[in-house]
Image (cartoon, rainbow, N blue to C red):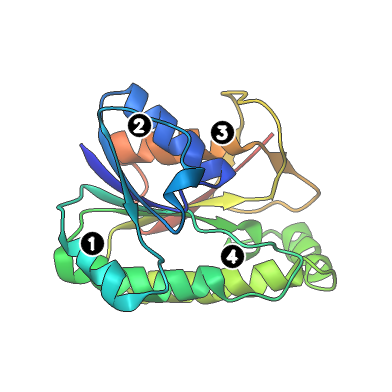
Amino acid sequence: MRALVIGATGRVGSAFVEQALAAGHEVTVLVRDPARVDLTHRGLTVVKCDVLDAPALAAAYRAGSWDALVDVVGADPLKPSTLVTDAAAALVPLATAAGTPRYLGITGTAQMPKTLLGRISSLVLRLTPVRHGARDHDGAFAIVRASSLDWFLVGCPWIKDGPTVGAYRRSRVFPGGMRTIHPGDVAGRLFEEFERPSVHKGIEGIWY
């Protein structure tokens, strides 16, 4: 299979690329600085491209045919940013026009359906600096949800540095509380959905 990955130099993106290549898939990554890609593999193609450069992005996207677009662009959640929203706004129309079978990405637990405790936790979160990241993901989620794409998003709590565990809880509803997940496991859930689609037009949250 062929995956186009945006955000491949980040913690989740790089882990996804490694897993996909190890499984024998073809991966193309669009990055602003190819020097930051420290992996070489016969199945890997590295293309210099800024996701916010519309003409360059369109040309790069149309240069191939993809079984899935994996959008794991990230920004510092503690600082104001619209990068995640802007990336979705640029990518969703291209994927739609190209008929890309799957759009895979990440979002926060704030975008998930919630229990009462989950709603309280999300309200508290939006009173902290993390509100900046939540707002950015709000914008991206609105774009993806309104599209005709077959999309899947991993609902992530705090993505904490740590080793891939390989086991975690899954839920379509955020129950609240302080929860964590490691980058390799987020990538693993995306990769699982890449190879064996099971959730269509929905978010599945994962945490330990």
What type is the residue that disc 3 sits on?
A: Asp
Marks 2 and 3, how far apart in space? 13 Å
In the depicted structure, whether residue 42 falls above or below residue 171: above
Please identify, in this view, whether the residue under mark 3 or under mark 4 is nearer the observer: 3
Please identify, in this view, whether the residue under mark 1 or under mark 4 is nearer the observer: 1
- Residue 148 appears in the rendering: no
Marks 2 and 4, how far apart in space? 27 Å
Is tag 2's residue or tag 1's residue first in the polypeptide sequence? 2
In front here: 17 or 133? 17
**In this figure, which residue is indicated by the disc labeled 4?**
111
What type is the residue that disc 1 sits on?
A: Tyr
Is tag 1's residue or tag 4's residue first in the polypeptide sequence? 1
Please identify, in this view, whether the residue under mark 2 or under mark 3 is nearer the observer: 2
In front here: 35 or 154? 35
What type is the residue that disc 2 sits on?
A: Ala
Q: Report helix, strand or loop for mark 2.
A: helix
Is tag 3's residue or tag 4's residue first in the polypeptide sequence? 4
